[in-house]
Image (cartoon, rainbow, N blue to C red):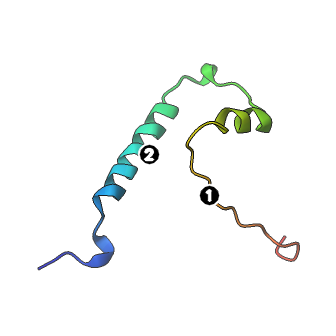
Amino acid sequence: MSEPTEHRKEPVEDEALDQLKSELRHAFSAPEHSYRMLTAAEVIGRNAGSKAKAYPVPIESEQEL
């Protein structure tokens, strides 16, 4: 009997999840004193050349605020 569709994962999803877990472990393993404040411009500039994926962010209308 096969596994229900909603519980099956593609190998690509498994790899992506493993990669994300690894990146998060690395990012949060740094000691607190090693962090520094960045401006939005610094973050944008730092990421401008990366292959980071951009995800759309919903914009709330004034009525919802």
Q: Is residue 42 or residue 61 the one in the foreground?
A: 42
Label 2 or label 1, whichever lies nearer to me, is: 1
Q: Residue furthest right?
A: 62
Which mark, residue 30?
Answer: none
At numbered mark 2, what does the secondary structure look like: helix, strand or loop?
helix
Q: State the residue at coordinates (71%, 36%).
A: 43
The amino acid at mark 1 is: Tyr
> Which of disc 1 and disc 2 is earlier in sequence?
2
Residue 7 image-quadrant placement? bottom left
Rendered image quadrant of residue 4: bottom left
The residue at 83%/73% (across/down) is 61
55 is higher (above) or lower (below) than 22: below
27, 47: nearer the viewer: 47
> In x, y percent, where is residue 12?
33, 56
Disc marking residue 20: 2
The answer to whether 36 appears left or right of 63 in the picture is: left
Q: Which residue is situated farthest in the left direction here?
A: 1
Q: Which amino acid does label 2 sit on?
A: Leu
At horizontal 59% and vertical 38% (from top left) the residue drawn is 50
Which quadrant is home to the N terminus?
A: bottom left
Q: Vertically, is 10 above or below 6?
A: above
Q: How crowded is mark 1: few (under 14 residues within 10 Å), some or many (20 or more)?
A: few
Tell me if mark 2 has few (under 14), some (14-19) or many (20+) residues whose alpha carbon lies within 10 angstroms of its own: few
- 16 relative to 45 in the view: left or right: left
**In this rendering, does residue 28 appear at all?**
no
Q: Could you tell whether 30 is left or right of 45 in the image? A: left
The residue at which mark 1 appears reads as: 55
Q: What element carries label 1?
A: loop
